[in-house]
Image (spheres, helix red, strand yellow):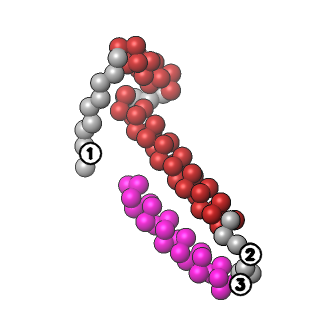
Amino acid sequence: MRASVNISLPQDMRQWVEEQVRSGGYGTVSEYFRELLRQAQKQQAREEIDRKLLAALESGEPVPVTSDDWKQLRKEAKKRLARISRKAK
């Protein structure tokens, strides 16, 4: 179910958005804003991954990873991807 969100824009900004809709191939202003939000969500996810990778690098000496460790990591990654996919719908 979709929920409505109303925003107010100055006239010059509204005209700019409408131009982006026309030139970007969007059908409506709503489509344009939804795309902006999806891009922001993806960027936030990338930044979280970067933070986690940096934390891992700074966490101490490396530890060898076994094939069983990789199997467990793959299993957990598939679970997380399934949760993300369900949320995105």
Q: In this view, does 23 lie to the left or right of 52?
A: left
Measuring from the top left, give residue 83's x and y in whole percent. 43, 66
Q: Can residue 55 be seen in this view?
A: yes
In front of the other: 18 or 11: 11
- The amino acid type of the residue labelled 1 equals Arg
Q: Quadrant of the C terminus?
A: bottom left
| Residue type, numbered disc 3 | Thr
x, y (%) of residue 87?
39, 58
Q: In which quarter of the image is residue 84?
A: bottom left
Rendered location of residue 74, percent (x, y): 59, 75
**Residue behind mark 3:** 66
For mark 2, does the 10 Å Cα neighbourhood hold few (<14), some (14 to 19), or many (20 or more) residues? few
Q: In this view, does 20 lie to the left or right of 54?
A: left
- Three-letter residue code for mark 2: Pro
**Marker disc for residue 77:** none
Classify 68 as above or below 16. below
Please, what secondary structure does the residue beneath circle 2 have? Answer: loop
Q: Magenta part mainly helix, strand or loop?
A: helix
| Region rendered in magenta | 67-89
Separation (CA) of disc 1 from disc 2: 47 Å
Q: Mark 1 points at which residue?
A: 2
The residue at 53%/71% (across/down) is 78
Q: Which of labels 3 and 2 is toward the front?
A: 2
Residue labelled with disc 2: 62
Depth check: 71 or 51 in front? 51
Distance in Å between CA atoms under marks 3 and 1: 46 Å
